[in-house]
Image (cartoon, coloured by chain):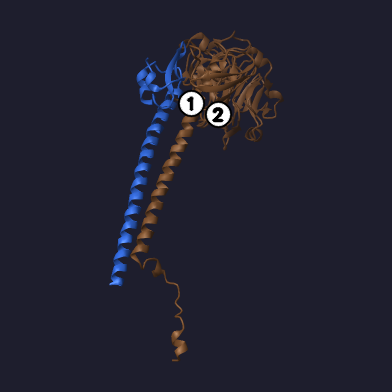
Amino acid sequence: VIANGAVVLERWLASLVLAAGCSACVWLQQDAARVVASTGVRQDQLGRLLALTAAPGRQPVDDSQLAPIADLFAGHRLEWSTTAAGAFVTVRAGAADEVGR
Amino acid sequence: MSPAAADAPVARGWSWRWLVDSPLVLATWLAVGGVCVTMLDAVTAVGSAERVRRELDYALARIAAETAAFQWQEAHDVGVLEVGGVAVEVERTASEWRLASRLADGSTWRFRCDALSGAAPAALAGGVVSSSADVEPEAWPQLDPAAVATARRADVLPAFRRDAGLALMHWSAGTEADDFSLDPVRCRRGLVDGGLIVVPGHLWIEARREPWTIELDRDLTVVVQGNAYLGGNVVVRGAGRLLVVATPGVGASFADRDGNGRWSAGDRALVGARGKGPLEGAGVVHVGFAGRPAPETLDFGLVAVHAHLHHDATFAGPVLLSHGTTSLGSRPATVTSSGRWSFAVQRERVPGFSTVGAPRPGLLRDDAGNPAVGVEQPLYLASPAR
């Protein structure tokens, strides 16, 4: 009886360890997936910013070009500055949702 | 068997089965392995996120530094300018800006840029211009006389050789002006250097088995006060770009329609008074020679009055010909630019050329001297920072 009890207890503990391991894996994977998704969005926004700043003075002033990267920098907002030579992107302090106020 | 032998402990060796014998041990191994693999993924994701965060910091610091450079009005001073919540320390000397962007997290990014007296000629922005009438007059490149007067001259530079016999290999009567060619070994060893070089005569790039390789760390403009005869391949290595300028000087340029290498009846005068200067003219370019293979790699830009083409020619940089081309081969030839490089005329200095417009900062470079981004940068601001 004691031997059978030990076996059952061991199997129960093994199940517990497996369940804990699986839970940890799932939790880690979800967290990693969230980070990867967020990084992908940021990287895409960064690429758009580089495209806008790589050929200065040529793009027409168009707020729709900045909309996808409006929240790129926390606490800062991007905006167009215009000169006789054309338009280009600059940064100002403030949240992105303050644009247009 | 004696009783003592029966009571002795049984010696047992190590067995790998111990690692998997028990369900609990096996489950522990599986759990640890799974967590380790997942942890590796998570660490990779966090590392990638950290890299992107640093790239974002760099981009923010760069935009702020560039804006500060345009807004800094003091000629020689040191100070701090706040741009979009980023504190930018500005130090301006006569020749450059030094900028340090300090972000909210305390990280500091340093940049520098040249102080330019104005924009470079707009026509050097790239592509092919086959007539000066196609662009605005101020867009056409004008050599800076002061820079040309003080430039290094090919007749005293070891990377160039004067060779009286070169022209006789192609023209029966040779040429009246001095003929220069490159020294292949010294060019390859980087002894040409950047800046501005004046060739007081014709420049010959002869066809040879190996391409003419020129090591350049900085941009170089070679002003040929004669004709440029391009028969061989030219390869430029390094960060510098090569621009060859053929200028008539006091001589005359003409379209050599019969291809005899000198002024004769039927040729078309283009620039300068006929009869002035050398008989073979000046300020024009000959690409290829009759009966010789075409140069395939012309890794430089070109500014000249006119081009005589025995073959199609493709240059790596901008090609500006104020009076077009003449085809001398059996079929019409064209000149093109591969567009492999061009000048960011608003933000870069082109050695030897006059500038137009207001003074401005050049392209931002990082501490190591590399371009901060791409080949072009934002232009100056219309309004000062608040």
Question: Which residue is at the front of the view, B188 or A89?
Answer: A89
Q: Position of residue B268 (x, y in %)?
A: 52, 12
The mark total stands at 2
Identify residue for label 1. Answer: B60
Q: Position of residue B114 (x, y in %)?
A: 59, 21
**Dot 2 lies on which element?**
strand
User: Badge 2 sits on which subunit?
Assistant: B
Write down which chain is painted blue: A
**Dot 1 lies on which element?**
helix
| Horizontal side, residue B233 vs residue B184: left or right | left
Between the residue at mark 2 and the residue at mark 1, the CA separation in whole angstroms equals: 10 Å
The residue type indicated by label 2 comes to Trp
- Residue B340 shows in the view: no
Q: Which mark is residue B221?
A: none
Identify residue for label 2. Answer: B109
Residue at the spot x=47%, y=16% of the render? B130
The residue type indicated by label 1 comes to Leu
Asked if B97 appears above or below A24 in the picture, the reply is above
- Residue B147 shows in the view: yes
Asked if B261 appears above or below B367 in the picture, the reply is above
Q: Quadrant of the N terminus of chain B?
A: bottom left
* N-terminal label among 2 and 1: 1
| Horizontal side, residue A54 vs residue B229: left or right | left
| Horizontal side, residue B191 vs residue B374: left or right | right
User: Badge 1 sits on which subunit?
Assistant: B
Chain B pictured colour: brown
Q: Residues within 10 Å of mark 2 (few under 14, many from 20)?
A: many
Residue at the spot x=47%, y=26% of the render? B339
